[in-house]
Image: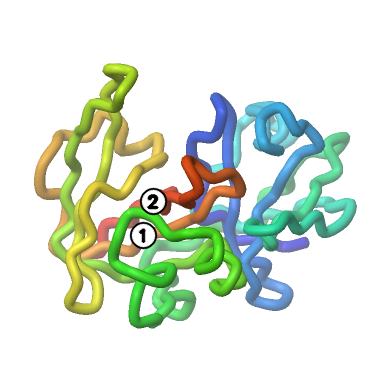
Amino acid sequence: MKVLILTKSAKHGEYCVAGINLDNMAWVRLVSSDKSTMYALTREMVEYATGEECRVLDVIDVLTVEEKPLEIQRENVLIDEKYYFEYKATCSAGDLERFVCNDRYIFGNHYSYIDKETALECGCSLRLFEVENLELVENTNNQNQKRRKVNFRYNGHDYNGISMTDYEFYNYPLGHVADKAYIVVSIPEDDYNGNYYKFVAKIFIKE
């Protein structure tokens, strides 16, 4: 499978790697067989034969075993863990416009979460959106842990306190990031108190 990688984000201490299958232009999430990490990929699994890790916006060839759709995350595809990724090319953020979703809302509403019925109705768990006025904020959860969040505006609606799992922005200065940006938004397979919280898996600052 030839894949344009659009996320390589944090997932249970490992990576959530997803992107576009360039053979049919469909979203895919590359997963492992390790249920304990919700099928995240390890660092060894995202390497080329050179030992270098793949990067977001790389185009890769990856050997896959089978589609492994879950109830919410229907895009999941199991990789063959015995083989390296093969680097083919690199794209730029300017090439992403053709993959942008123009839905009225980001996954059903302008809140930070959706209920299970809405998650199932969406029929997908990955989308790319163009947003405005993106800013980074930091909240403290009920375990007194600091967590990065993002606020932005999309299609006339403000989205506040959306979780963020983009490693590249974990140490980025808080506050305004970009007037315009592309973001990959994902929905997890597991719920929290019956709700499915949206999270921004990747941020591309639009020049």
Q: Quadrant of the C terminus?
A: bottom left
For disc 1, the marked residue is 183
Relative to 21, is 97 above or below?
Answer: below
For disc 2, the marked residue is 200
Q: Secondary structure at mark 2?
A: strand
- Residue 118 is at least partly visible in this image: yes
Relative to 57, is 9 above or below?
Answer: above
Q: Residue at x 27, y 35 (%)?
A: 148
**In this view, which residue lies farthest toward the front?**
193
Which percent across, then down, holds residue 80?
Answer: 86, 43
Q: Residue at x 29, y 27 (%)?
A: 141
Which percent across, then down, holds residue 129?
Answer: 37, 69
Which percent across, then down, holds residue 42?
Answer: 67, 29
Which percent across, then down, holds residue 1?
Answer: 78, 61
Query: Count of labels shown?
Result: 2
Q: Quadrant of residue 110?
A: bottom left
Q: Secondary structure at mark 1?
A: strand
Q: Is residue 155 left or right of residue 16?
A: left
Q: Residue at x 55, y 66 (%)?
A: 117
Residue type pointed to by label 1: Ile
Q: Nearer the viewer, mark 1 or mark 2?
A: 2
**In this view, which residue lies farthest toward the top?**
144
Relative to 138, is 163 above or below?
Answer: below
Residue type pointed to by label 2: Val
Q: Is residue 32 left or right of residue 95?
A: right
Q: Are marks 1 and 2 in contact (CB under 8 Å)?
A: yes
- Residue 207 is at least partly visible in this image: no
Looking at the image, which is closer to me, 159 or 201?
A: 159
Q: Residues within 10 Å of mark 1 (few under 14, many from 20)?
A: many
Q: Residue at x 38, y 51 (%)?
A: 200
Label disc, if present, on residue 56 of the rendered structure? none
